[in-house]
Image (cartoon, helix red, strand yellow):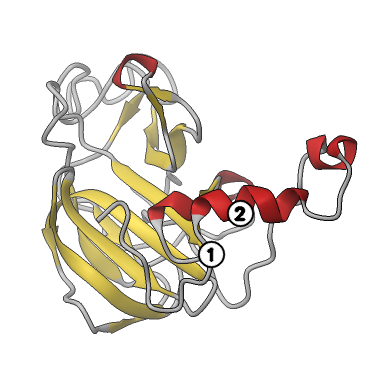
Amino acid sequence: MRNLALPWLVIGGGTLAGLALSGRTAAAAARPAPPPVLAGTWVWPMPTFRGRAPVVSSGWGSPRDGGERRHRGVDVMFKRAHREEFVAEFPPGTPDGSKGYFVPPGTVAVAASDGRIWSAGWAPGGYAVVIDHGKPWATYYAHLASLQVTAGDRVRAGQPLGVVGADPLDAQELRHLHFALWYGGAGDSAIDPEPVMRAWRVVEVRDV
């Protein structure tokens, strides 16, 4: 799933760095690039919970596997307003939550924008979905406990894709959604989605 390429892929992740530097000085390349402009309607990949918006609990580039690799996406959860909030309902140290974050059982992942399901199935990190939004954009959703879509389905922004679960390789089995934004159609071409997500709205789905 991670290195899956869509049929319209024309460049790989390694080529992106070269394109970013092409025709520009090293000093110009060092400046932060502005967030990309995405056409159409885009929403957060998890809905509200009791009126509360989800947040990024672990961002792009955070260390994984003891620092051997870097996070190529963001994790999405709900943030506790204070350390004691919801501790009885979603206890820290359980699949329901950590000290600072939580995800209720039955929470769904939703399509970030209109598109077609390119793949939906089991992967090493749980059920995963890739949505083709039309070149050059695709989105990737991982650690799902179950699916509500199949490959080939057309989906609209905010439509449920499946129930959020945990990474089977995580000893705590902490429930969260891994979300990635792909430019170019493959996991190696992922970019940091958080800057553009700040402008996306959050949909409301019936609270569990």
Horizontal side, residue 167 vs residue 154: left or right? left
Horizontal arrangement in the rendering, residue 201 relative to residue 143 (left or right): right
Asked whether the viewer can see residue 173, the reply is: yes
Residue 35 at x, y = what percent? 70, 53
Residue designated by label 1: 11
Residue occupying the point 32% across, 72% down: 159
Q: Nearer the viewer, residue 37 or 53?
A: 37
Q: Is residue 50 visible?
A: no
Instruction: Name the kind of residue labelled 1 in the image.
Output: Ile
Callout 1 secondary element = loop
Q: Which residue is mark 2?
A: 16
| Residue located 20% across and 28% down the image | 90
How crowded pointer 2 is (Cα within 10 Å; few <14, some 14-19, many 20+) is rated as some
- Residue 57 position by quadrant: top left
Q: Amino acid at mark 2?
A: Leu
Residue depicted at x 34% and y 27%: 101
The N terminus lies in which quarter of the figure?
bottom left
Q: Position of residue 11 (x, y in %)?
A: 53, 64
The residue at the point 89 percent across, 43 percent down is 25
Label 2 or label 1, whichever comes before in sequence order: 1
Whether residues under marks 2 and 1 lie with C-beta atoms below 8 angstroms apart, the answer is yes
Q: Is residue 138 above or below residue 79?
A: below
Which class describes the residues within 10 Å of circle 1: few (<14), some (14-19), or many (20+)?
some
Tell me residue 145's x, y (percent).
Answer: 12, 50
Q: Secondary structure at mark 2?
A: helix
Horizontal side, residue 139 vs residue 28: left or right: left
* Residue 3 % position (x, y): 32, 54
Q: Which mark is residue 2?
A: none
> 21 above or below 94?
below
Q: Nearer the viewer, residue 13 or 155?
A: 13
